[in-house]
Image: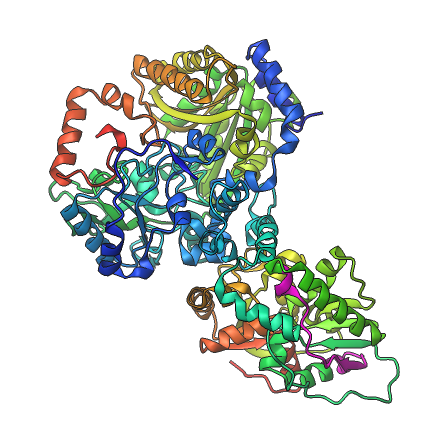
Amino acid sequence: MFEMFKDKWILEALKGSSLGTKLSAIKKFIVDKSKIDNLTKCALCPNMCRFACPVSVVHARETTSPSGKSRIALFLKKNYIEKNETNIRPLYYCLACDSCSVSCPYNFSVNELIRPLRENYYKLAIYPQELRELITMLKEFKCIYNLSNKKPDIKNEENINIHEALLYPGCIMMKYYPNNTNVLSKLLEIMDLSVKVFSEMIDCGFLAYELGAHELFLEIASELANKINSYNAKYLITVCPECTFTFRDVYHDFKIKLRPKIYHIAEFINERMEGFALKQNLKVTIHDSSTLAIKLKKPNLLNDILKRIEGLEVILPVRYGLNTFEIVGENSFLYWVDRDLAYEINKERGEELSKFANNIIVASFAAKKSFEDLGYGVKEISEFIWDLINGLGESK
Amino acid sequence: MVKEVMRKAPKRPEIVEELKKLIGSRKVSNNLTDLISYSHDYWPITFTWLLNGSLPALPDVVVFPEDARDVIQVVKFAYNNDVPLYVYGGGSGVLGGAVPEYGGIVMDIKKFREIKINDIDMYVEVGAGANGMILEEFLNRHGFTLGHFPQSLYTSTVGGWINTKAIGQFSVKYGGIEDMLLGLEVVIPPGELLEIKPNPRAAVGLDLKQLFIESEGLFGVLTKAYLKIWPYPEKRILLSYVSDNLEDALKSVREIMLSGAKPAVIRVYDKIETLKWFHMIKKAKGKVGTIIILEGDEDLIEAEKIIVNKAFKNALSTGEEPAKYWLENRFNVKEISDYLPLGIIIDTIEISVGWSKAIELYNDVINAIRSVDGTLIAFAHASHFYPQGVCFYFIFGGLPSNKSSVLDYYNDVWESVMSTVIKHGGAISHHHGIGRMRANWVEKNMGKVAYHLFKKLKQCIDDKGILNRGNMGV
C-alpha cells in the first residue's frame, strides 16, 4: 500500500512508537510520499555518485558535484535564488554521460533531473554566454558547425536502387575525418551491405536537446528524419554513440519516426565480424563511451569485439564498461562552456589510459579527436578493424 | 533570498579581492552558488532547513588551492588578518563539523588527489582531497586494498577520514584510519608545512600524527597522507548466524575477538534491524542476526572459519545470503531523501562501550530514544569490535508532534542518548566525531582536565583560533 511498508521490517520497527505518532506518519505516507520529486531526493543525497562523475572528480568543487548541482537546481526551482547567468551556470557543468545513475540507489541521472531547468532558462534566453555561438550555429546551419563546404569522401553508387544501409557520419566525423566515410563504406560493404552515405550536413540534434532547446531540436530532428527516411534504407549506421542514442531514444520520445533500424558502427561490427579471422600482435587499451555503456546498455561492446582478435592484448584501464570515465568531445556543451575544464578532464583520462598501453581504441570520432589533440595514439574501432582486414595495423 | 541560521560573525567582503591577488582569481569564488554549496555538510538537521531555503552559515569566500604553496599562502593570510578558515573535503560529515559558522574562508582541498603506490614498503601516498572510492578502485586495479570502507566511501575524502577518526565496515581486520596512517603533511598556523614521513614505527619524540587524528580541522590543513595498504584479498568467505538474543550474539563475537581471529566484517543486528538484513531467512524473525565476512589468505581464513563456527555453535547458521545482500546494499544511502521531505527526521548515533556494560547501555539508549515524544523508529547494530568492547550504531527516526518542532525533537533525542552514554561511562562518539552537534557533551565525556589540555593545545598551535572556529566548542 505504501512504499515504505513494502519493507515489512519497518512495520515491526514502528510498533514501539505511540499510536498518535504512528497515525501521523501513516497520514504523511499516504498524502505526501508520492509528492516528493526526484530532484529533491537527489539534492538530499550525500553525493554518493560523485566518484563516478568526471566533472566532479576533475573540477573538484561542491557546486558542480552531482548533488551539488541538484541543490542549486532546487534553489532555482523554488525561487530561493535569482535566475541569472551566474546562478544557472552549474547546470551546464555536465557531460550528460549518466555515470551518476550507475551508483545511485534510485538510478537517477542528474542530467535528466536538471535538463528541464535548462529548458526553462533557454526559453527565457538565460544561458552561459559561451553557448551563444553554438546556438547561433544550430539555428543557422542545423549543425554545431558550418559544414556547407564539406562533403563525404565517397561517390554514392547511383545504379543501386535499394541501399540496405545509410551511413550517417555525424558532425565530428564530417568536420575532422571526412575521408573516413570512404573507409567506413568499404568496411560495411565487406560486411555484405550496400551502402549510401548521408551527404547533407544536418546534425542529429543531440546538443540542442541537451541544452533544452526543444523547439530547435524538433526542427532539426524532423527535417533530418524526413531526409533519412527518404533513402528507404534498411539500416541506419551511425559512428557516434550520441547520434545512436538520439536517433534511438530521443527521437522516439519526441515521436519522430525513423524507419531504418539504427546501429552504432561498433554494434554492427560486433554482429558481423564472425567471418573474419583477424590477427594482430599488439597491446591496446580501451576507452568505453558512456553513452554506449550506460544509455545504450552495451558496457562491453569494445572489449567484446577486440577479444576476438587473435594475438591482441587488451589491457583494461581502471575505469571501463559501466564505470567508464567519459571525456569531453566537441559534441558536449561543457566543451563550449569551459574549455579549460574540458581539457583537464580529457588529460586525466588520457594519462590514465596511457599508463596501460600506447594504443587507445575508442568507439567515437569525438573521443578520437579529443585524444589526438592531446597527442595520444588512438584509433576509432571501425578504422582499427579496417586496418586489420587490410593488413595495415601496427604490431607490438 | 537564502537565510542563514547559524552565522555568528559580520560579513567580510573585502577579503575576496585580496585572496584573488594572493593565489589567482581562478582559485577564488564568492559566487552565491559556491557560498551556498559550502555552507553545510551532511548534518541531517540542516537539510530540513535547506528544504526551506535556509542554510547553516554562508562563508564569505571559497578558495580552491592546487598545491601546498597555495594552502600556506591562505593560512598566512587568514592568520595575519584574523579570518576564520574552514577546510572542506567531501562534505559527508554528519555533525556540522564543516559549517563555517563564523564566515570567512572555506578551503576546498579536493584538488589534492594524487595517488602513488609504494608496493615495496606497502603504503600509498595520497592527497588529502582524494575520494575514497577512487582510491580503493585504483588500489584494486594494481592488486591492493586499503581495507577502509566507511559507508561514505563513495563521497568522502582521505583528509576527512583522518580529521574525524573514521572507520570502515571491514575494521575488525584492517582497523580504523588511525591504524592505517603512517605519515602526513599538514599546514599549520601561521603558515608552515609540517611533514611526518612514513615509517613502520617511530619512537622519535611525541607522535605528532596523533594531533591531527579526530582534530576536525582545528590544528591544521591536511594536504597529504601516507596510508598502509594490503594485498588484494585472495579469498572471501561469507557467513551468517541467528542467535536467540543480543546477549548470546555478543558473547559469541567476544569469544572470536579473544581468540585472535580477525574477521574483516562482523555485524550484529538487534531484533528490529535483523528483520531488514535477514528478511530472506524466515527463522530470523524475533532473533538476532550476525553477518561475518572473512577475507585474505585462503589457509588463514579457513582456520578463522573454524573459530567463528565454534563461537557461534549455539546459533543457527544461515549461510551466505544475508552477507551477500548486505554487500550489495551497504552503500544505498537514501533515508534522508525518502523521509526528510515528509517531516520525518532520521539520524544515526554511534558510541562505544566496554563489554561489561554493552547490553545495559544498548537497552537504556533504545529506551531513551523511545521516551522522546514523536519517535517512530529506534534500533541498532554493533559493527566494530575489540577485545575490550563494542561500537553500537543507533538509528532513530521521528515525526515531532504538533507541539514541538523538528529541531526540538532532534535535540531531545540527542540529549537523552548522550546523557545515557555518559552515565554508563561510554564514549559519546566512536567514529563520526564531534562537530557542532556533539560539542556540548565533549567536556563531560573527556573530563575537565583532558578538555582543558585539549583547549591549551589548540591555543598553542592556533593561537588566533582561525581554524574551524567554533567547532567542538574549542
Q: Nearer the viewer, residue A132 or B438?
A: A132
**Is any part of residue B288 visible from this angle?**
no
Give the answer, above or below, for where A30 lies relative to B84: above
Q: Which residues are magenta?
A: A187-209
Residue A208, magenta (yes or no): yes
Residue at x 44%, y 18% (from the top left corner): B409
Give the answer, above or below, for where B166 lies relative to A26: below
Which quarter of the image is occupied by the N terminus of chain B? Answer: top left
Estimate the x, y position of residue A191 in percent, counting from the top left.
77, 78
Estimate the x, y position of residue A75 in percent, counting from the top left.
49, 42
Residue at x 56%, y 10% (from the top left corner): A18
Estimate the x, y position of residue A118 in percent, counting from the top left.
57, 54
Picture quarter containing residue B169?
top left
Which quarter of the image is occupied by the C terminus of chain B? Answer: top left
Q: Nearer the viewer, residue A199 or A190?
A: A199
**Is any part of residue B276 visible from this angle?**
yes
Picture quarter containing residue B115?
bottom left
Estimate the x, y position of residue A372 in percent, counting from the top left.
49, 77
B130 relative position to A23: left or right: left
